[in-house]
Image (tube, coloured by chain):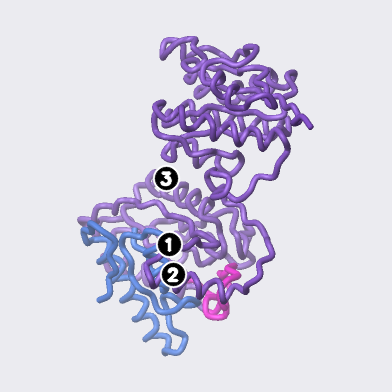
């Protein structure tokens, strides 16, 4: 499981092992200020990052920054 | 003036009641007159005021395998003795015995309205099951701690028997029950918080007024080896539900999670989906629910073969003042469903 969440410290506190930082609380995988196609791209990239996290072996809680 | 007299019934397992060891662990509940085993030093410690009028006994295995029946029998047998206090154990680290002590106390307290207390070691699995309902005094981890624990139990039984008020856990020596009590204090929260901060900075001990829950650590799952053949599921605590919230998932303090089929859906649109979460500005999620539950992106990656399949069902609850206990319950139930459906990986989104 990978947790895509904006408030990383909470995600760490509750014990998620794979964490991908998100955009903002009300729109973790979006950005209403961007044009629709750019916003879709942003979301696609975040989901790809989450999938990479799922393919990565982790021994301890890991935040996937890049 | 002589102290008020009070009546006590004591609960013991087959071993401490001197009936026998593991071979006798199947004996059904029975009650004996007077004090037995550890009840004898307990009676001495209580002195004149309190009298152990009977000892309730049950085999540990019998109790653990027939909790409901055992608890009913305990209530039935204890009731005619009309005790003022019911005391169980100490159970030390014994798991089945701990559960028997906790369950008996909880039932007697609930059904008969009699104050109850037990004692066990902090790692006894029964502690977390019963600490909210029952006063549980910390004991050592083995019977070697009997001599120390008996006077503590006697002191507590005496307080309950005389109807004295029980103070805070650290004052009266029992495991915190997670109860918050309002009280008047002379100094504001800001002043008290700064004091605590200063103590913390100086590395000195301080007492929190509100301890945070502790969270279980779960080992990380193994990585997905072949994403192209993997089934990935979406789960969210961000409250994305079909428009109108058909299952009435609560906006705060959720009591449930919901499951929806998205096998025919490629994009979450504002006319068909919404958020029911009451803890963040819903404008952006209502405008485009993919911003919280990225279904459109998952479909793109499914079509181009990056992932094998997006699971047909998604799971949703609201993470807004939702209790840790409920959250754990939802998490376990969702994980079981996903495992049964051979899902390989999960993306959980939170707002």
User: Considering depth in this image, is B92 or B101 the residue closer to the camera?
Assistant: B92
Q: Secondary structure at mark 1?
A: loop
Distance of label 1 from label 2 (alpha carbons)? 7 Å
At a point 46% along the width and 58% down the height, the residue shown is B314
Instruction: Please tell me whether mark 2 sits on a helix, a strand or a loop.
Output: helix
Compared to A46, does B95 lie above or below?
Answer: above
User: Does the CB distance between marks 1 and 2 fall below 8 Å?
Assistant: yes
Q: Which residues are magenta?
A: B267-287
Whether the magenta-drawn stretch holds residue B274 is answered as yes
Q: Name the colour assigned to chain B in the rendering.
A: purple
Q: Are marks 2 and 3 in contact (CB under 8 Å)?
A: no
Query: Mark 2 and mark 3: span between their CA atoms?
Result: 45 Å
The quadrant where residue B151 appears: top right
Residue at which label 2 appears: B199
Q: Label 2: chain?
A: B
Marks 3 & 1 on one chain: yes
How many numbered badges does the structure rendering display?
3
Q: Percent position (x, y) of residue B260?
A: 51, 57
Q: Residues within 10 Å of mark 1 (few under 14, many from 20)?
A: few
Subunit bearing disc 3: B
Residue B153 percent across, percent down from the top left: 56, 33
**Residue sitting at x 56%, y 70%:** B275
Can you tell which mark lies on residue B138?
A: none
Decide: is A63 above or below B121. Answer: below
């Amino acid at each position: 499981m990978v947790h895509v969440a904006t408030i990383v410290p909470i995600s760490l506190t509750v014990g998620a092992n794979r964490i991908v930082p998100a955009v903002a609380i009300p729109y973790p995988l979006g950005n209403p200020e961007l044009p629709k196609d750019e916003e879709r791209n942003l979301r696609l990239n975040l989901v790809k990052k989450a999938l990479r996290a799922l393919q990565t072996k982790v021994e301890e809680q890991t935040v996937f920054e890049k | 003036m002589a102290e008020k007299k009070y009546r006590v019934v004591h609960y013991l397992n087959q071993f401490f009641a001197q009936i026998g060891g593991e071979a006798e662990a199947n004996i059904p509940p029975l009650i004996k007159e007077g004090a037995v085993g550890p009840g004898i030093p307990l009676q001495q410690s209580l002195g004149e005021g309190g009298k152990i009028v009977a000892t309730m006994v049950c085999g540990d295995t019998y109790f653990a395998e027939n909790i409901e029946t055992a608890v009913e029998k305990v209530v039935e047998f204890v009731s005619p003795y009309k005790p003022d206090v019911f005391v169980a154990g100490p159970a030390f680290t014994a798991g089945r015995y701990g559960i028997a002590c906790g369950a008996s106390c909880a039932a007697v307290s609930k059904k008969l309205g009699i104050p109850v207390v037990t004692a066990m070691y902090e790692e006894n699995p029964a502690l977390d099951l019963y600490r909210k309902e029952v006063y549980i005094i910390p004991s050592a981890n083995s019977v070697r701690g009997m001599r120390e624990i008996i006077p503590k139990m006697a002191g507590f039984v005496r307080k309950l028997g005389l109807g004295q008020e029980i103070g805070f856990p650290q004052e009266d020596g029992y495991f915190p029950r997670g109860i918050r009590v309002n009280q008047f204090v002379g100094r504001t929260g800001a002043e008290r918080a700064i004091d605590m901060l200063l103590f913390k900075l100086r590395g000195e001990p301080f007492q929190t007024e509100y301890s945070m829950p502790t969270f279980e650590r779960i080992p990380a799952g193994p990585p997905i080896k072949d994403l192209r053949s993997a089934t990935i599921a979406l789960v969210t605590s961000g409250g994305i539900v079909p428009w109108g919230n058909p299952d009435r998932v609560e906006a705060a303090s959720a009591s449930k999670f919901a499951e929806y089929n998205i096998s025919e859906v490629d994009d979450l649109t504002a006319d068909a989906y919404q958020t029911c979460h009451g803890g963040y500005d819903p404008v952006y999620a209502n405008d485009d629910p993919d911003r919280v539950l990225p279904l459109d992106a998952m479909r793109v990656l499914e079509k181009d073969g990056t992932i094998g399949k997006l699971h047909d069902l998604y799971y949703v609850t609201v993470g807004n003042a939702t209790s840790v206990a409920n959250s754990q319950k939802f998490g376990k139930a969702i994980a079981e469903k996903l495992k049964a459906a051979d899902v390989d990986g999960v993306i959980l989104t939170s707002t």
